[in-house]
Image: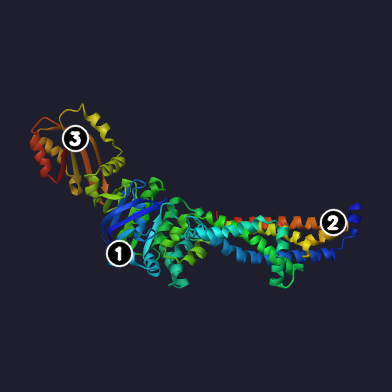
Amino acid sequence: MIEFQDVHKTYRVAGREIPALHPTRFTVPAGQVFGLIGHSGAGKSTLLRLINRLENPSGGTIIVDGEDVTALDADGLRGFRQQVGMIFQHFNLLASKTVADNVAMPLNLAGRLSRKEIDQRVAQLLERVGLSDHARKYPAQLSGGQKQRVGIARALSTNPKILLCDEATSALDPQTTASVLQLLAEINRELQLTIVLITHEMDVIRRVCDQVAVMDAGRIVEQGPVADVFLHPQHPTTRRFVQEDEQVDENEQRSDFAHVEGRIVRLTFQGEATYAPLLGTVARETGVDYSILAGRIDRIKDTPYGQLTLAITGGDMNAAFARFTAADVHMEVLR
Amino acid sequence: MDLINFFASVDWSEIWQATLDTLVMLGASLLFTILLGLPLGVLLFLTSPRQMFEKPRLYAVLSFIVNVVRSLPFIILIILLIPTTVVLVGTSLGVAGAIPPLVIGTVPFFARLVETALREVDRGIIEATQAMGATTRQIITRALVPEALPGIIAAITVTTITLVSYTAMAGVVGAGGLGDLAIRYGYQRFQDNVMYVTVIILILMVQLLQMLGDRLVVHFSRK
């Protein structure tokens, strides 16, 4: 479990204090995938680096598994960092070392295992990330996705309890992104590893995260389970991220719907409700007509969801609304 | 025929001895240049602005000393250093007498090249190594230097070639070696043929060193 207690960070640039992170409180429960989303300069990168103290906080306390990380001395910090893996946007592999030597590096630095034990561990890790055949290659001979897999194997080599991901998929194409995210999700499940990731893509949050915190100008502006935040965004920044992901422009949509007759509602289904034949049933029973103006059916991590914007005309509209609300569906009346 | 006559009077055993002397001077001064210049280069890099151990004052002092030595023409440096050389190796003459000025003359040059090579290493590599829980020494020896190795080898190549020309200059103060031979025969005795032979040997030496250096850079670049 990671706990931030009023942690803040200011940089001194040319004699002026620039706040990068305003006093922040939040908790990452153990074993969860926690996503931090924000635009560049929102402070998410600073926040991530505070966890393993690549950045030192200007104030506040960071507790990881009951230990005050902010109070560690140099030796203690090195020991702590060996229990926290980290992967990077640009992979940060050593070009001078082979894949196997890159993965072995944290183990060699820690110096606790024998040569033979390290070799075994490296073989096992490369197998885990599907790169057993590339052990003797150098990073320059690998694709971006393969490099990130090496990064993940390296980060896992010391059996950490926490994995920090710094825009780990931002330099990858969509297909490779999907496979790397799937690997992260597997690792989280199988190793009970706590993952904190930062990204500027809602899609990444939607695919792997349990919880999300939205950052804007050095503050967490919205936080909660991904489904809640994603389906019912409150803060303008969150709404923008969701719209970017759905490729919807709210203003455009409003003008498109201006000529549509009847009431406009947005229904949000989650879990099993997504597959229930609700619309047809309600239309038959209450005599309303509906047309689907916009919609999306997808998954948030492992949970299916649907979000449909409907225009409803005729029949017993109030009865229809009551039926929607009674079913396990979230309804918002837009007009 | 003329060409054979032209080189007939060349004393090849003397040339061989001079070549050996040059190689000994080169080898010994290169060794000490690397031993002293590599740590100095690392120190310059680490204390420079925006690096791990940013120390503006120390960096300014080191930088100033390095620049002072680099601004002196080597021939003047040799003469300036004669008393120091006598203290260090007991003589200012011969191969031994040439090594201290050669080392002192090239260390600052090499250190600057090392600093530049280290600057080429992606900051992300340092960050990743820090995140693994590495000590400062480990960051330097296990990440920074190995990653900068192609650049450092290129720096060693350039430094070696500079040393070749410096050893020739050291001939002026009786250091021995090819430069000494060229000046004694070619300049003082008007025996051009010896000078031409030494020039050819020096050219070959530089070409070989550059070729070797380039090969090593390619090998260690891992591209």
**Three-letter code, disc 3:** Leu
Q: Which residue is drawn at 56% across and 57% down?
A: B115
In the image, taking residue B111 as reference, residue B27 lies left or right, namely: right
Q: What element carries label 1?
A: strand
**Residue B171, percent across and down?**
78, 62
Q: Which colour scheme is used?
A: rainbow
Label 2 to label 1: alpha-carbon separation: 77 Å
10 Å neighbourhood of mark 2: few (<14), some, or many (≥20)?
few
- Foreground label between 2 and 1: 2
Q: Which of marks 2 and 3 is in front?
A: 2
Residue at x 27%, y 32% (from the top left corner): A252
Q: Which quadrant of the figure has residue B89? A: bottom right
Front-most of A76 and A100? A76
Cα gap from disc 2 to disc 3, whole angstroms = 100 Å
**Upstream in the sequence, badge 1 or badge 3?**
1
Q: Is residue A21 above or below residue A252?
A: below
> Which amino acid, by three-letter code, is at mark 2?
Tyr
Residue indicated by mark 3: A310
Identity of the amino acid at label 1?
Val
Give the residue at mark 1: A64
Please indicate, yes or no, whether residue A130 appears anywhere in the rendered image: no
Q: In which quarter of the image is the N terminus of chain A?
A: bottom left
* Disc 2 to disc 1: CB gap under 8 Å: no
Residue at which label 2 appears: B187
In depth, the one of B172 and A234 nearer the eye is B172
